[in-house]
Amino acid sequence: MSERALVHVVDDDPSFLRSMERRLLLYGYEVATHSSVEEFLQRPSPEVLGCVLTDLQMPHASGFDLQQALARSANPLPVVFISSKGDVRTTVKAMRGGAEDFLTKRSTKTELIAAIDRALKRDKVDRAHRMRRSEACHRLKTLGEREQQVLAGLIKGMPNKEIADAIGLAERTVKHYRTSLSQKLGVGSPVDLARLVNEAEG
Amino acid sequence: MSRSSSKRAAESGPVEIGSNCQEAVLCLVAGAPMPIAHTLPGHPDRLFVNWAFTRAYGYTSEDVPDQAAWFDTLYPGEPRRSEAVARWEASFAKAVAEGTDVASAEYTIRAKDGTERIVEVSAALIGDVVLGTFLDLTEHKRSVARHRESEERLRSLVAKIPLPLAFSLGASGDDLFLNSAFKEAFGYDEKDLSKISDWFELAYPDEAYRVQVMETWTPLFERAIRSDGFIAPREYRVTCKDGTVRDVEISAVTLGESIVGVFQDNTTRKQSSQLLREMRDQLDHAGRISALGQLAASLAHELEQPLGAIFNNATTAEEILEKENFPQADELRTILHEILDDDVRAGAILDRIRSMVQKRKPRPEAVDVISAVGEVLLMVGPSAASHGIEIEVAPAPGRPSVAVDAVLFQQAILNLLLNSIDVLRRRNSPRVRVEFEAGAEGFLAVLVSDNGGGVPKEEESLLLVPFHSTKPDGLGMGLPIVQSICEEAGGSLCVKNSPGVGFLVRLELPLWEGGAR
């Protein structure tokens, strides 16, 4: 990963935590370790690419608790569980919760890197998606009421004339609003406009 | 002079002897130690009795001077007298007619002291003298009667004893007597067993085994006769009349020529102890599986961490070595490789154990708590009793059944009782109490408490932690296993520790609702 990425490791066993940190550093990741779910949730949250490797069974909050808390947060990082082999029930439960991947405590280099990179890639996609969405929302908010009405007509595929009739304006005025909204949103064609609205709606 | 000499006389017919010789014989008779009465030569009516007769029966020659006086005195009253006279005269006439001695016969005479005596009278004819000898049978008869009586008493005593007994009074082993307990136990009666040898034939039909039994029995029997008359109990495989084979402990006493055998059927006792042993094994096995499951789950999690850390570190070190190059790097690589291999191997063992123990699924069923607890008590009772520990089971309202795997439930109760027994060993008036009460809606609470002093306050929180034990050799899985059994059944466990007083463990288990579960 050329981009800066931070891998969070959550485990109650300090020895395991240290060894995993050492290993991931060697593989070139930036690592943050946390000895409990609570500690992880209270971390300063820099807006950088990242993912979480977490143990499932921990004395207080479990890996599932972390998964749920994270899903509700502003920065829902992908979660990779580190669990025992052959624990089907746990796997199913974790998958339903949207777990990115599973690793055993003794994963090979390939397995480990593949799982982390998949998680980071998903985070990158999610993050880009979230960014576009917030940008689109931001831009849409700059439109005036008439511009919004014209935009609504445009993404339904209506010609200027129809829009003018529908909202009770002259066709020329509609053209004027169309130019100004295209300038504000940075896109002009009805297809691009529709995509932007879609993104904003999430 | 004796009976046998008079018999010899009888064989050779009446003795023809001269009067001098007759005198000599009568002289001998007078001093003979045997009671004798005879007529006088030439005076067939006159009687003489010797000193031995006087000593035995009290009468002198003056008391019975003639035959009439003889019969009057020795056989007083009628019809006794006439009967005696008739019998005597008949045998006398017969002897005279046949030229033999008078056949010996029993008479009951009255002695001078008034006692009745049974005597055997034999008589010989010596010339014109009738000479009768008297053998007192009274003592002999009495002892025979006494013997018969005591034999009868023994029989009736033996007959009433509820233990199977058999005895034989003769040296030959004939005339075997069996009591009713014996007949009931083995089905054989006197018709089947008329002598001891029949027993060996019937009870041990397999010849090889019979030989083996005889080889054991005979020296024991011979030793008993020579020494203390006791044959120590030994177990034999006895075949009953109906063909069933039972383990019977046989002992015997010998009294002179008699032998009394005592039979103790151990089959039932053995069966029940066998059953108990099997039950304990089963429980033990289930307990081990359940303990192993718990152990494996805990072990797997606990070991997963260090194994994971070792794996990570060794892998990292190996990868660093790939980049760097310095002397002995190969050696280090080998070492790290071996560390990794062993780590992976250990992990695989854990995985295997875990997948193995996960296969046993508890099967909830209706468990009658009272009888289930009762069965556990059968197992721990003896050990508790040997430490003077009293285990009290309070009655339960109704006869509640809970929905739980029966074996696991018993395992749980067993663990709790064993825990209590462990701590109670060296305490005063040790007591364990098992009680039942209604729990939450649809639950029954089972309470096991003891007065073993509990644990110090600071150890309280560690009670349910696996591998933490208060006992030096404890595994620390007792309570955690009980807890997991309760939780798997949908119930719960709580422990109340009163430091210095004792422990109370309360299990809540779902009541069985008529098979709906």
Image (spheres, grey):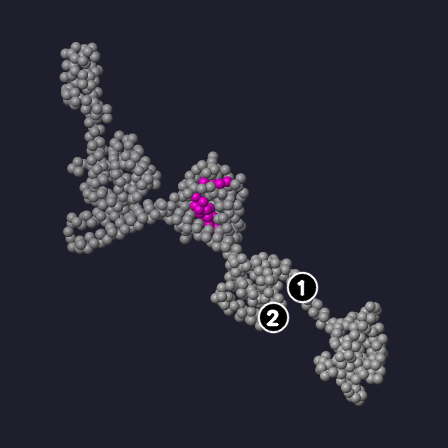
* Chain letter, disc 2 residue: B
Q: Is residue B412 visible?
A: no
Quadrant of the rendered structure where residue A64 is?
top left
Going from N to C along the chain, the mark reached first, 1 or 2, is 1
**Label 1, label 2: how far apart the Cα atoms are:** 18 Å
- Asked if B459 appears above or below A64 in the picture, the reply is below
Give coordinates of residue B154: x percent, y percent. Answer: 65, 63
**Residue at image point 28% right, 39% down:** A81
- Asked if A118 appears above or below B317 in the picture, the reply is above
Q: Which residue is mark 1?
A: B152
Task: Tell me if mark 2 has few (under 14), some (14-19) or many (20+) residues whose alpha carbon lies within 10 angstroms of its own.
Answer: few
- B257 left or right of B4? left
Task: Tell me if mark 1 has few (under 14), some (14-19) or many (20+) residues whose alpha carbon lies within 10 angstroms of its own.
Answer: few
* Chain letter, disc 1 residue: B
Q: Which residues are magenta?
A: B400-423
Q: Is residue B44 visible?
A: yes
Q: Residue furthest front?
A: B97
Q: Return the mark for residue B171.
A: 2
Instruction: Look at label 1 and name its amino acid.
Output: Glu
**Residue at image point 16% right, 18% down:** A181
**Residue at image point 54% right, 59% down:** B240
B377 vs A55, nearest the viewer: B377
Where is the C terminus of chain B found, in terms of image quarters? top left
